[in-house]
Image: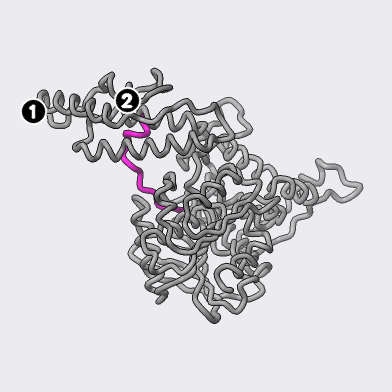
Amino acid sequence: MFTSGGMLRRVTERKPPGVSIESWVEMQIREAQERGEFDDLPGRGQPLKGIDGPHDDMWWIKQWLKREGLSFTPPTLALRKSVEDTLGGIGRLRSEKAVRDVAEELNERIRQMNRMPPADGPPTSLGVIDVERLVESWRAQRAAIESTAGADTNLTARTAPSAESAVKKGLGPVARASRAGRKARVERVGGWSSDEAEARFRAGEEALWREECTIAPEALDVETSAGSTRVYRWPGAGESLVLLHGMGGAAIQWVRVVRELVSRDVYAIDTMGDVGRSRPKQAFRDHAQVDEWLSETLAALGLERVHLVGHDHGAYLAMRRAIASSNRVITLTLLDPSGFAERSARMVGRLVTSVAVILLPGPARRWAATRIGMPLLAHKLLGRLTFLALRHHRYGLPMPRAVRDDELASLSVPTLVLVGAKTVMFEPDGFVRRVRAQVPCVEADVVPGVAYAILADAATGARIRQFACP
């Protein structure tokens, strides 16, 4: 465990022989109190939240889901609700072009869902929207609004029945409106719940750098309009590689991949708004601002054209840059990219399972981590850091939206896509088929036996080197 002074202590994992469990636990608590590890903890002297409510073993996971605005609604139901919410407010759109654009985006999502049904939840029964009928319905609603607006220009249009009939099948009388869909977008600044939680994480992060990093990188702090960005550089020869980590992570995640890229010029960025050492000055309203932050960071580093490598949300950011600025991207590597699946009960279940694995004792933790395809969780220190990040850090980036087929088709740079066979983000074989069909110049493969911890697989770094640095 971590002491308040930031030093790393080794805690006895097994009870000494001949000592009762009760005596051993009391001794551990007493020694911790004597060391002052319970002093000045957040919430000291304050009543416990929810103490009078019913007992729930999953209380902190539910709090985390609520804080991060996450949901485990089955993907098909989430899409159905999104369609009905959009149709219910179609009269508020100001132009026919906006109506057609919204309809086409919904139709693309419906086609993708029908083409690749998710493994969780009920099957999809949605058909594509009849765009022309929807436009006719919108015209009628706009005419009614404009004729009755008068003094109140903010009058909200009621949903016309014909708007719902624009969907050929399967909508039914579900909710007509979504409170979440009508709320203004909340700007989120990533941050820790307390200084103490961040201090514990930083102490473990430094210990992990010492333990895992055989070649120490150069730490750089780059100023951007969004704040100070921490970048780690391993100087070397050739065209530069830029690594973007996944959600809830930091540049430290790349150390095992970097071992395979020795002698190359490599930069690993702590994404603004995540648990790394970048310090945001403002919230990101949307991904356009995130794109601007990344552009400023690369410009400040003097990097004109680079090989981009991204994992999870970092892969989504890398892909957006490759689409918008293909002349600045030499190759693109995507590892278990986000933006290709709705959140599902499987994803939330994997989160719960991962936390349970982290809390297991050594031998059981190593066995369980291998069994679920996440070997990084077998590393006790890394597991504890993951737990701290999940429980005490608020994610500060907007969530990825669904990636469309036309966006995949617009990727003009050589692209490598690797996904874990045990991923819960999407059905891996179907996803690889989709990528191969849409991306013009791509190598796409499923990596056997791994899930989110694809970065721990030694073959991943070797494959990146072979693809980007032949």
Residue 253's place in the image compared with 46, above or below, is below
Amino acid bearing label 2: Ala
The image quadrant where one finds the C terminus is bottom right
79 and 434: which is toward the camera: 434
Residue sitting at the far bottom: 237
Q: Given the current orientation, which residue lies at the most extreme right position? A: 18
Q: CA distance from mark 2 to mark 1?
A: 31 Å
Q: How many marks?
A: 2
Q: Is residue 245 visible?
A: no
Element type where label 2 sits in the image: loop
Q: Amino acid at mark 1?
A: Ala
Query: Could you tell me what secondary structure mostly forms the magenta stretch?
Result: loop
Res 5 quadrant in image = bottom right
Q: In this rendering, would 83 be left or right of 89?
A: right
* Percent of width and height locating residue 36: 64, 55
- The residue carrying mark 1 is 151
Q: Which residues are magenta?
A: 178-191
- Residue drawn 61% across and 69% down? 466
Observer-nearest of 212 and 340: 340
